[in-house]
């Protein structure tokens, strides 16, 4: 008996398959009014290839404040480089670089205080960038001599108060510490690394004081912070420091925990300040009012280390452990999820490596950069968790890498409601500042779900698709381009496997692998799907058309389409049993998407009881909606 | 099966349409529902509940903070053999000695 089974409700993907609208998996796709749309994208704003950002590391902290009376988003990287951009949307520029030394910046934090000044945490000192002062000094020009640490000013009136301040010189990536000699003469802490020259622009950051506050010793830990009434609350190791924003006084032990505790979260809410700490690999959430000697509510213990404490958006908090998020009032907590998709009961989860500012709540969604080094649905990406349904969507980073991605900070700029984040990838080596939004997906947008009701044997025959264009989109090209590919797999085969490209081979249409060694996927079949997980071809999806020297160390997979670049040796690959059912490639489409839908013949591609149907949308210039998917199969129990 | 064959079978009524799992209409969460109806949520009452079921701690430093609630307006002070009840009103802390 021929059956037609449809899906048209797409609320998100999860672990259980029991929730209304739950499907199996997607990437770069967002629930929409008419189905699901290729409408998530992480847009790169600036990366290390841009001028002034060459030394940028992964941004660990963001903050929002004013500078020159304009709203700016600020970011601080691992090495204490501070960058800023007006509204976060214009070019990001290096604004300051802290000195490395006794106040090592590696374990840091960043916050804008009640006076709109920027506080930057270093190992020992808390620095202050008074962005209201506008007294940074750049009058005149300077002359430098290569290899010398003496500089000469022309038209300058340097003063003794400039001593100890940081100075940046045109043409040099380095930032120096200045010592005043005279109005036109000064010395630097190290020699100049650029060619001898005169007439160079420069800036002395007078408004920055790296040692405004002293914590008393180096504390090589992250320093989460928040504002609470007129206090700046800063967590460092096992202590909480308070800075009074009225008189700038500092109390370094306003709240102390025993030595073995490490604070990873400090966040304000309606019941006080919630402190997240870890002791002996167990997390504890502690509610405090900034003046009591002790907690104001019984401690809340968790059986996992705490990674972050963030505002939930309703006055309460989300406490994120290495395993899962909890909704917390300071007095009680409850789990938000039972299990994340493909997380194993006995292992950590996609939340494992979240940093103190590594998640944010926006519109009822918990957004975070997460994932593990696995090759299943727990792979790296920007995760969007619906706090009401517990269902997920996930977005690729801008270079499509799904392995070797390092996330640190994610930040909601309240001024324009944009979400900013930094990420770094190892292959290719990239550090970037990005913004997440509803834009047409650049990377392949993928949807996967399970079809095949009942336990009878079935033969897949065809797949029907109804597509549309996202109704939010108002950028209307004269001609539309996009490609839709459809694949099918029987669930009687292992869904996820992995391989690595070996050193041999430079062909763009072949991948040499070790088909014998244990490090690769065993028993790849002709027709299987290969996804490149990292490197210059990250995100590219192909199918195997031929296998040479199968099950040997010299196995070679021939691909159905040429890759854009030669794949790097060691690049990780995801291997899945999806069989190609064809594609529709639309170019110059003016009459809209065909209303009769698209039909894909999958005869001979899959036999089984349950099937996975995968849809891949590529090369779009408008966000394409999937409105309905139907699998036609022959139910053998009813013949 | 090619599209033409499928359409022929569909036209002859040889394709059975399988009912999709029924999907419940979007639920408004309990929390949202209470907010919409103007009800006070349990989370808002929780601090009061916790404060009332515990003893109030004594402190050994004179209070200087500005209290936010009735319970914070009362402070039990103990330093050596000095016992005081501090009360905050008219923008300052006042105390009386206790035995």
Image (cartoon, coloured by chain):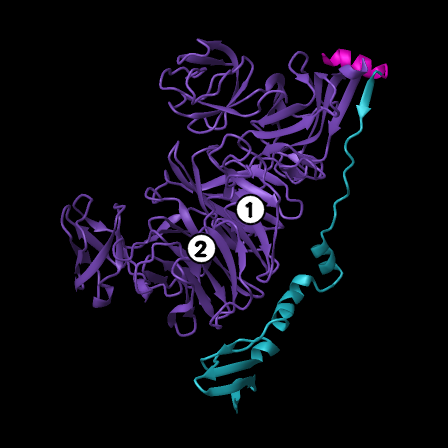
Q: Secondary structure at mark 1?
A: loop
x, y percent for residue A140: 24, 57
Circle 2 packing at 10 Å, graded few (<14), some (14-19), many (20+), is some
Residue pointed to by mark 2: A279
**Nearer mark to the viewer, of 1 and 2:** 2
Q: Main secondary structure of the magenta part?
A: helix
Q: Chain of mark 1?
A: A
x, y percent for residue A405: 44, 37
Magenta residue check for A380: no
Left or right of residue A277: residue A14: right
The N terminus of chain B is located in which quarter? top right
Whether A266 is drawn above or below A169: the answer is below
Residue pointed to by mark 1: A324
Q: What number of labels is visible?
A: 2
Residue at the spot 17% in from the left edge and 49% down from the top edge:
A191
Whether A282 is drawn above or below A436: the answer is below
Magenta residue check for B6: yes
Structural distance between the alpha carbons of marks 1 and 2: 17 Å
Q: Which chain is purple?
A: A
x, y percent for residue B47: 62, 67
Q: Chain of mark 2?
A: A
x, y percent for residue A272: 54, 66
Circle 1 packing at 10 Å, graded few (<14), some (14-19), many (20+), is many
Q: Where on the picture, by quarter, is residue A163?
A: bottom left
Bounds of the magenta segment? B1-13
Left or right of residue A603: residue A111: left
Whether B49 is drawn above or below A322: the answer is below
Residue at the spot 43% in from the left edge and 12% down from the top edge:
A555
Q: Which chain is cyan?
A: B
Residue at the spot 47% in from the left edge and 24% down from the top edge:
A573
Which label's residue is closer to the chain start, 1 or 2? 2
């Amino acid at each position: 008996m021929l059956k037609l089974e449809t899906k048209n409700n797409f609320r998100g993907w999860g672990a259980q398959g029991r929730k209304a609208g739950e499907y199996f998996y997607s990437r770069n796709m967002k629930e929409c009014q008419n189905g699901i749309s290729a409408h998530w994208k992480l847009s790169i704003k600036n990366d290390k290839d841009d001028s002034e950002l060459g030394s940028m590391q992964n941004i660990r902290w963001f903050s929002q404040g004013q500078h020159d009376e304009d709203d700016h988003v600020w970011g601080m990287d691992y090495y204490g480089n501070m960058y800023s951009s007006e509204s976060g949307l214009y070019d990001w520029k290096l604004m300051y670089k802290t000195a490395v030394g006794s106040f090592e910046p590696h374990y840091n934090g960043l916050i804008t205080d009640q006076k709109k000044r920027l506080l930057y945490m270093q190992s020992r000192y808390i620095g202050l960038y008074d962005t209201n002062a506008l007294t940074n000094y750049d009058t005149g020009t300077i002359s430098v001599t290569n290899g010398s640490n003496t500089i000469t000013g022309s038209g300058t009136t340097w003063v003794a108060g400039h001593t100890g301040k940081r100075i940046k010189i045109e043409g040099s990536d380095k930032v120096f510490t200045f010592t005043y000699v005279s109005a036109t003469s000064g010395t630097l802490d190290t020699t100049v690394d650029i060619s001898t020259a005169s007439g160079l622009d420069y800036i002395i950051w007078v408004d920055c004081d790296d040692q405004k506050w002293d914590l008393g010793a180096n504390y090589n830990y992250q320093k989460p912070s928040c504002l609470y009434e007129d206090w700046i609350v800063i967590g460092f190791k096992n202590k909480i420091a308070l800075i009074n924003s009225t008189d700038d006084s500092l109390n370094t032990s306003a709240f102390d925990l025993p030595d073995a505790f490490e604070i990873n979260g400090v966040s304000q809410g309606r019941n006080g300040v919630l402190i997240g700490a870890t002791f002996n690999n167990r997390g504890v959430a502690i509610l405090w009012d900034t003046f009591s000697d002790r907690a104001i509510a019984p401690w809340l213990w968790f059986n996992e280390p705490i990674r972050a404490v963030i505002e939930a958006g309703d006055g309460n908090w989300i406490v994120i452990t290495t395993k899962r998020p909890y909704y917390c009032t300071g007095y009680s907590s409850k789990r938000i999820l039972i299990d994340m998709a493909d997380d194993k009961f006995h292992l950590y989860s996609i939340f494992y490596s979240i940093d103190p500012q590594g998640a944010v709540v926006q519109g009822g969604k918990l957004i975070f950069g997460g994932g593990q080094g696995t090759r299943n649905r727990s792979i790296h990406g920007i995760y969007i968790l619906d706090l009401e349904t517990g269902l997920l969507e996930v977005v690729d980073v801008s270079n499509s890498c799904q392995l070797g991605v390092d996330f640190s900070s994610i930040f909601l700029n309240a001024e324009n409601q944009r979400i900013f984040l930094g990420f770094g990838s190892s292959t290719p080596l990239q550090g970037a500042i990005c913004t997440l939004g509803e834009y047409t997906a650049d990377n392949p947008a993928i949807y996967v779900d399970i079809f095949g009701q009942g336990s009878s044997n079935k033969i897949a025959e065809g797949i029907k698709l109804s597509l549309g264009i996202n109704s939010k989109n108002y950028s209307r090209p004269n001609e539309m381009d996009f490609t839709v590919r459809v694949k099918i797999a029987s669930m009687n085969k292992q869904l996820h496997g992995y391989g690595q490209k070996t050193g041999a081979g430079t062909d763009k249409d072949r991948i040499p692998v070790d088909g014998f060694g244990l490090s690769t996927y065993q028993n790849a079949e002709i027709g299987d799907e290969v996804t490149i997980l990292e490197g210059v071809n990250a995100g590219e999806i192909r199918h195997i058309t031929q296998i040479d020297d199968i099950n040997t160390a010299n196995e070679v997979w021939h691909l159905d389409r040429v890759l854009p670049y030669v794949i790097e040796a060691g690049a990780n690959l995801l291997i899945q049993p999806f069989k190609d059912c064809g594609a529709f490639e639309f170019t110059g489409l003016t009459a809209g998407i065909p209303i009769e839908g698209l039909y894909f013949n999958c005869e001979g591609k899959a036999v089984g009881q349950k099937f996975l149907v995968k849809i891949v949308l590529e090369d779009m210039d408008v966000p394409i909606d999937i409105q309905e998917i139907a699998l036609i199969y022959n139910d053998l129990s009813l013949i | 099966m090619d599209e033409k064959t499928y359409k022929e079978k569909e036209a002859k009524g040889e394709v059975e349409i399988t009912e999709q799992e029924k999907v419940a209409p979007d639920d408004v969460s309990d929390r949202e529902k209470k907010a919409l109806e103007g009800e006070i949520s349990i989370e808002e009452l929780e601090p009061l509940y916790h404060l009332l079921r515990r003893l109030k701690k004594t402190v050994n430093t004179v209070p200087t903070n500005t209290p936010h609630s009735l319970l914070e307006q009362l402070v039990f002070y103990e330093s050596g053999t000095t016992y005081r009840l501090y009360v905050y009103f008219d923008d300052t802390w006042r105390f009386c000695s206790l035995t």
